[in-house]
């Protein structure tokens, strides 16, 4: 299940900031995608390239 904590963990593991409340509200969805997939989407939206590259290399 996708939780804010699991998503924050994925973001923090690549040196990115935790999810903001606005981002959490933006990405809430009825399905439960993997946290790494959602983290990738958030990082792309932020334009946060260094953590995004690391996430893509490590696979989340």
Image: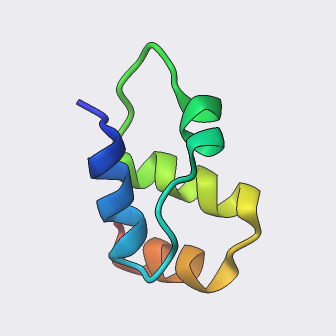
Q: Is residue 60 above or below residue 23?
A: below
Extreme-front residue of the structure: 21
At x 36% / y 47%, what residue is drawn?
35
Which of 55 and 9 lies nearest the eye of the viewer?
A: 9
Q: Could you tell me residue 60's position as x and y percent?
A: 34, 66
Quarter occupied by residue 33: top left
- Across and down, in percent, residue 34 comes to 34, 42
Q: In this view, which residue lies farthest toward the left? A: 1
Q: Quadrant of the N terminus?
A: top left
Please name whichever residue, 53 or 6, is drawn nearer the observer in this view of the structure. Answer: 6
Q: Position of residue 12 (x, y in %)?
A: 38, 73
Position of residue 45 in the picture relative to residue 18 (left or right)? right
In the depicted view, which residue is nearer to us: 36 or 57?
A: 36
Residue beneath the point at 76% across and 69% down:
47
State left or right for residue 36 relative to residue 51: left
**Image vertical order of residue 3 relative to residue 12, above or below:** above
What percent of the width, then of the height, locates residue 16? 51, 75
Residue at x 54%, y 58% (from the top left corner): 40
The colour scheme applied to this rendered structure is: rainbow
In the depicted structure, whether residue 43 falls above or below residue 33:
below
């Amino acid at each position: 299940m996708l939780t804010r904590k699991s998503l924050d963990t994925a973001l923090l593991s690549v040196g990115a900031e935790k999810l903001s409340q606005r981002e959490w509200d933006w990405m809430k969805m009825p399905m439960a995608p993997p946290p790494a997939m959602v983290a990738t989407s958030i990082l792309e939206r932020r334009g946060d390239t260094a953590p995004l590259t690391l996430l893509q290399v490590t696979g989340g």
